[in-house]
Image (spheres, grey):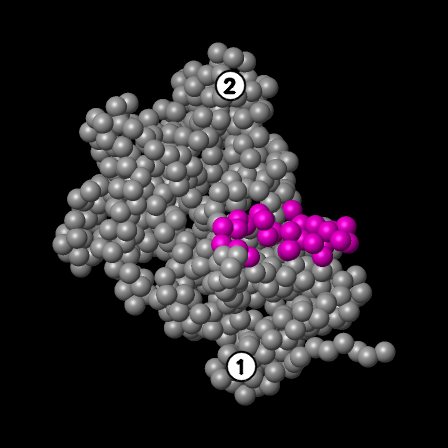
Amino acid sequence: MAANKNKKRLSDLRSAMKNKGVDALIVPAADPHLGEYVPDHWRVIEWLTGFTGSAATVVITSRFAGLWTDSRYFIQAEEQLQGSGFLLVKLKVPHTPEYIDWLAGNVKKGKKIAVDGRVISIGQVRLLESALGSKPDISQDLISGIWTDRPSLPSEPAFEHPLKYAGRSRAEKIEDVRTRMRDLGADFQLLTSVDDIMWLLNIRGNDIKFSPLLLSFALVGADQVLIFTDEEKVPGTVKAAFDKEGVVLLPYDMVSRVTASLPDGSALLLSPVTTSASIYKSVPRKVTIMEDISIPTRLKAIKNSTETGNIREVMIKDGVALTRFFYWLEKNIGKEHITELTASARLEAFRMEQEGCMGPSFETIAAYNAHAALPHYGPSEQSDAELKPQGIFLLDSGGQYLGGTTDVTRTVALSMPDARMKSDFTLALRGTINLAMVKFPLGTKGFQIEVLARKALWDNGLNYGHGTGHGVGYFLNVHEGPQTIGTGSSGDMKTIIEPGMLTADEPAIYRPGEYGFRTENLILCIQDAVTDYGTFLAFETVTLCYIDATLIEISLLDDRELKWLNEYHEKVYRTLSPLLSTEEKHWLKKKTEALYRQEH
């Protein structure tokens, strides 16, 4: 039935394309803010094709309809696209615009290629122009006329993020941004990423699932900050505070009209990655456009002392919730019906018992046996597997707390693992440990240290296909740059790792059809030492959750790695045990006992 609906929608869209003279239509998986998560109103690809993954691009012509996505979603897409009229096109390299190459090779020059300019970045449009030798039509919204029961935009109210969590006032942050603007020679800073605006104005919202965001744009000037949002969603107390600090509320859909009226000769700073083509094209030609990542993106990546203190407290709460979950799982597996979905729900319940927890920070990856070999697997009613006392269980989850955002992965054995499983787990764990132990000079970029996370795997002919570390927001997005620890992405190449940055550390190994192992901690960059050779930095592992020793082959750990593991487990027990029940405390004591080599 669903597939028939998708076929009908595709047919209707092709008719609309024909009426508008459009030969090829691009449909990105995005909203006007070009972030990772989008509200239901903008989930066009899901409505059109039935595919529910977060990363995809659709291209439609009169004879072809294809969906590009990466390896995380190949199996899912093949199932969900069946009978829809759409073909899966497998990306060779994740997060690359390979659909552009297809258009260049399959659509004749002079044909009209269209895309809704509100949901594609100016950076992507430039790539299109370069490859096609012509400009795409960015004025076409062909979806609204067909999607008659389209969900409304969210209407949940915004709220203040108090100073005891934020650490710096709204006025201080605005002045910091203006100081940087003056240094750069910018008269205005356009903010299109919602997390930038939330951080700058010390507010949060409920418009995006998993991320506490209020859909909005902002324009920072010398005297005022304009915020474009639905005024009805801003409480009176927040409005009053805004009035006193020169923050002016304007309707959400007025942003392009305001950018179109910027004075001649002024300079506007914006990010080409997160600014839509529609907004970019609205800027007058006599305005100088300066392109870079936004100033708030850089500033909020470095957590202040209040934020880092709160993060450490949040990690204790999260550690308690995780400990109680794994204790519950071990005591009840094989005795009651537990599935991937019910396990996810139980973990969320344990988290919500913790003070200040506002919900999960992303869809929990609860993956049993072969499902764990899919890095971004999300259990559904169709795939929901029952957990049994055999095999392994991978759990990648996180919480949104008023004092920070968490992201942690643990893999546990539900029965005795074999030698290959222990070897695989330990080699990946060595990567987690070695990245956590690194010391490096100020000025180092993520790609320069990533080999430490992969070396043990590479030495044994193994690897994993995703990045090693992403930045993490502060009661904002779980994936938040600009820093990364990867193999040469654009952010990786430009951004140095600095004290106060919170980053994921998640080496892994996957055996398709069998299992996957990933141990993920969050690591906080701290200053280590100042020597004659400069300032040296290190990482503090702030995640607090035991690592399953039954999966560890001790002979594969060197002395430094074993020492790190034992000291980490001692810290986990010392920190969490006072907050646990007697039974939980005894259980965690056994889980964190020091490991020693057997003497021969």
Q: Secondary structure at mark 2?
A: helix
Part of the protein shown in magenta: 440-465
Is 443 in the magenta?
Answer: yes
Most distant residue in the front direction: 532
Q: Is residue 494 visible?
A: yes
Identify residue for label 1: 574
Q: Nearer the viewer, residue 383 or 327?
A: 327
**Residue 590 at x, y percent in the picture:** 65, 82
Relative to residue 493, is residue 245 depicted above or below?
below
Please name the residue shown 53% across and 51% down the image: 444
Q: What is the CA distance from the residue labelled 1 to the residue labelled 2?
A: 61 Å
Around disc 2, counting alpha carbons within 10 Å, would you say few (fewer than 14), some (14 to 19), or many (20 or more)?
Answer: many
Image quarter hosting the C terminus: bottom right
Identify residue for label 2: 132
Q: Nearer the viewer, residue 586 or 364?
A: 586
Disc 1 or 2, which lies upstream in sequence? 2
